[in-house]
Image: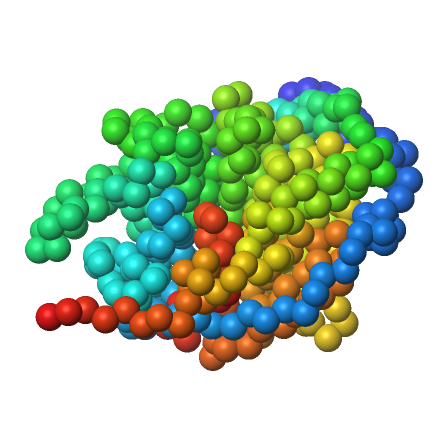
């Protein structure tokens, strides 16, 4: 009888600590969500305009958007590398 | 005992309800700023010309699937790793192999070049990230100088040096990311928040500060503060695992590629997804994404062996590139933007320009 009671008590304790762990996790999730809700945001129109401006400013320097002459792109060069033995 | 348990259950239910309310509030706040679509704003931008991009070099030498690659800052060297445990350093101009290391494990899923060009980091099923200093002496056994830096409790999925050779950021199948000191192997910061394996990470461009983004099997992309370990923003719009994340060159946005066959662009200041790059005809997952230098082009490597090139602003596909004979597993644009490299399950790497 005593043994059964001890087993039951430790099972209960196990369930409690499991619940407490779940509560700790749930609390963390709630705190995290509060942080995320409260951040400062910008309108998509403004954010999109900034992305576009960046692309346009840097388009000239982008060799894959504005191809440079073959002689300036080392991978497009037709020269073969030969080793002199 | 019983009443305590009832109380605990009540608290749990109460917290869960609060959680759901906050999630709804978050969506509402994000929706308030959604006044226009990116591609609408981009209508006035000039369209891109015809694209002529093809394979300029093929790097052959791996005995099995290529899983990961990274460029050296010198714009010509590449490190790649494969399923058979080999890590090879190549000169992409000449296609010569400069160094080769055999790892003690198979499936080396992550590799990275140090900013100085003097070392490489790699790891995979061994749950570790190890750093190998590269020696100019070809006969030296690189494996002898190996330094074990990171230790996770599951596979290493990605690694990246920070601004210097001194710190490494890793992500793992154990659901966490971690920042390590290379010299001492000490854990400097750990990042918890993903509910499943973390598959990829990318550091913000140095001008924009100490943050990085990670993507995982829980379909979430999280942005983290490296100093505090705090998750700053979280995005969950993908419908499947996120295999690759990459910051837009300005640091204000990032792109992701997923098993749901789409790539998406998330703006960090608008705190929402601003573009989806998809087509009905594309049904295979994206393994890897990267931007061109100006951020105008987004390259995606797909599991259907192709590379799709997207106009980031207009949301349209610009080009589709063929060449690999199996899944494209990794894709990176070179540091000066003159070319991009892909690695594939067909055992080869290709340089495109």
In the rendered image, the vertical position of residue B72 relative to residue A83, given as above or below = above
Residue B3, quarter of picture: top right
Residue B118, quarter of picture: top left
In the rendered image, the vertical position of residue B162 relative to residue B122, given as above or below = above
Residue B139 at x, y percent in the picture: 8, 55
Residue B253, quarter of picture: top right
Q: Quadrant of the N terminus of chain B?
A: top right
**Is B95 or B203 nearer to us in this picture?**
B95
In this rendering, does residue A30 appear at all?
A: no
Image position of B265 (left or right of B162): right
| Residue that sits furthest to the left in the current view | B139
Residue B226 at x, y percent in the picture: 51, 27
Image position of B308 (left or right of B176): right
Image position of B211 (left or right of B158): right
**Is B35 or B58 nearer to us in this picture?**
B58
Residue B227 at x, y percent in the picture: 50, 22
In the rendered image, the vertical position of residue B119 relative to residue B5, given as above or below = below
Residue under the image location 42 percent in, 34 percent down:
B162
Residue under the image location 51 percent in, 48 percent down:
B200
Residue under the image location 15 percent in, 43 percent down:
B145
In this rendering, does residue B170 appear at all?
A: yes
Residue under the image location 62 percent in, 57 percent down:
A65
């Amino acid at each position: 009888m005593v043994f059964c009671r001890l087993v039951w008590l430790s099972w209960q304790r196990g369930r409690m600590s499991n619940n407490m762990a779940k509560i700790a996790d749930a609390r963390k999730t709630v705190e995290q969500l509060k942080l995320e809700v409260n951040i400062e945001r910008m309108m998509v129109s403004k954010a999109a305009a900034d992305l576009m401006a960046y692309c346009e400013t840097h388009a000239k320097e982008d060799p894959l958007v504005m191809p440079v002459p073959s002689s300036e792109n080392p991978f497009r060069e037709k020269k073969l590398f030969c080793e002199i033995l | 005992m019983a009443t305590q348990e009832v109380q605990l259950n009540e608290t749990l239910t109460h917290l869960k309800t609060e959680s759901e309310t906050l999630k709804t509030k978050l969506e509402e706040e994000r929706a308030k700023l959604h006044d226009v679509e990116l591609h609408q704003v981009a209508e006035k931008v000039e369209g891109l010309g015809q694209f002529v991009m093809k394979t300029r070099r093929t790097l052959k030498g791996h005995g099995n699937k290529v899983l990961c690659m990274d460029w050296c800052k010198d714009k010509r060297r590449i490190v790649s790793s494969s399923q058979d445990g080999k890590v090879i350093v190549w000169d992409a101009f000449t296609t010569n192999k400069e160094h080769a290391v055999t790892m003690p494990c198979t499936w080396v899923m992550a590799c990275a070049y140090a900013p100085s060009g003097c070392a490489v980091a790699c790891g995979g099923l061994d749950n570790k990230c190890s750093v190998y200093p590269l020696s100019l002496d070809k006969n030296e056994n690189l494996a002898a100088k190996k330094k074990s830096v990171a230790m996770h409790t599951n596979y290493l999925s990605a690694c990246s040096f920070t601004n210097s050779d001194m710190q490494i950021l890793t992500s793992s199948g154990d659901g966490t990311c971690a920042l390590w000191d290379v010299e001492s192997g000490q854990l400097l910061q750990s990042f918890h928040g993903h509910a499943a394996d973390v598959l990829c990470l990318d550091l913000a461009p140095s001008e924009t500060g100490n943050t990085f983004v990670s993507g995982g099997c829980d379909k979430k992309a999280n942005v983290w503060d490296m100093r505090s370990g705090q998750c700053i923003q979280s995005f969950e719009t993908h419908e499947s695992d996120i295999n690759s994340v990459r910051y837009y060159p300005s640091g204000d946005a990032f792109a992701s590629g997923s098993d749901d066959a789409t790539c998406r662009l998330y703006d960090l200041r608008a705190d929402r997804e601003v573009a989806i790059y998809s087509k009905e005809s594309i049904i295979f997952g994206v393994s890897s994404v990267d931007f061109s230098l100006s951020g105008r082009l987004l390259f995606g490597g797909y599991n259907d062996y192709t590379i799709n090139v997207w106009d980031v602003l207009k949301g349209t596909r610009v080009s589709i590139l063929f060449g690999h004979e199996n899944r494209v597993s990794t894709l990176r644009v070179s540091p000066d933007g003159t070319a991009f490299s892909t690695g594939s399950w067909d055992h080869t790497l290709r340089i495109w320009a």
